[in-house]
Amino acid sequence: LQSLPPLARLVVATSDPSVYATAKAALPTTPVGALVTSTIPTGVDFLVAAQSLGAQSVPVYLDGATTLSPCDFTISGALVDDPSVLKAAVVALQRGATICPGVAVPAVASTLEFPTAPSQPLLLGCAHDCLYLVTLDDANGKPVVATRGSLRGGFAPVAVTVPQAKLKPGTYRFDVRLVSQVNPGPVLQQTSPPLSAG
């Protein structure tokens, strides 16, 4: 648990009270709460429940809600007895495939490796489902050739090749632009170091 990034809150989805104590000991400054499925646990900082719990001694989130909204980014992590119960929801969130009105998600490259020559492919992966535009620009920044496509978030990176073109001797750069496919936010743009041709 100490290796986790800083969390606003941690929701523990288990009925084992020792897990709460372990999480609290490992993350003393992080509020630790419990997802209520049957009995109401004790020793936690807050509760998360789809059903109304009535008056409680700690705050109750989603009190009376019917589902845990995948657009609620205030919950930063979960520990569960059976991870398979969250697999579909986690995959959707990791891929960024859930539409959240009013949310703008900046694109993030999970992998971006530029080649050493303009004729070689670059390696590209996205943290969330994304659209990409890759251009090979001349020394003046003018695109010579381009390719575009889409990538699924969290999948293995792919080799992206621009169309073959007869390049004049000189310096070129790859220009990579990414945008999230769902809940699009700011475009991520990165350029390669200068590459020589000819």
Image (cartoon, helix red, strand yellow):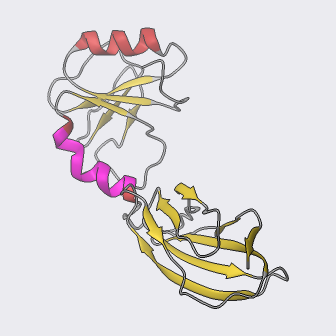
Q: What is the count of numbered marks? A: 0
Q: Quadrant of the N terminus?
A: top left
Looking at the image, residue 152 lies above or below residue 154: below
The image quadrant of residue 193 is bottom right
Q: Position of residue 159 (x, y in %)?
A: 45, 67
**Camera sees residue 131:** yes
100 displayed left or right of 68: right
| Relative image position of residue 60 (x, y in whole percent) | 37, 33
Against 194, is 48 above or below?
above
Relative image position of residue 170 (x, y in whole percent): 80, 79
Residue 44 forms part of the magenta stretch = no
Q: Quadrant of the C terminus?
A: bottom right
Residue lying at the far right of the rendered structure: 140
Task: Give the left or right position of residue 161, taking residue 95 as reference.
Answer: right
| 143 horizontally vs 91: left or right | right
Could you say which is closer to the camera, residue 41 or residue 148? 148
Q: Which residues, given as a range, are shown in magenta?
A: 84-94
The foreground one among 44 and 147 is 147
Q: Main secondary structure of the magenta part?
A: helix
Residue beneath the point at 54% across and 67% down: 102
Q: Please give the name of the residue rendered at 33% of the width and 41% of the height, measured from the top-left corner.
A: 63
Task: Residue 98 in the image: state x and y as whole percent.
Answer: 37, 63
Q: Is residue 69 left or right of residue 85?
A: right
Quarter of the image where one finds residue 12:
top left
Q: Does any portion of residue 70 appear in the rendered image?
A: no
Residue under the image location 56 percent in, 71 percent down: 120
Q: Is residue 93 above or below residue 76?
A: below
Query: Residue 97: which quarter of the image?
Result: bottom left
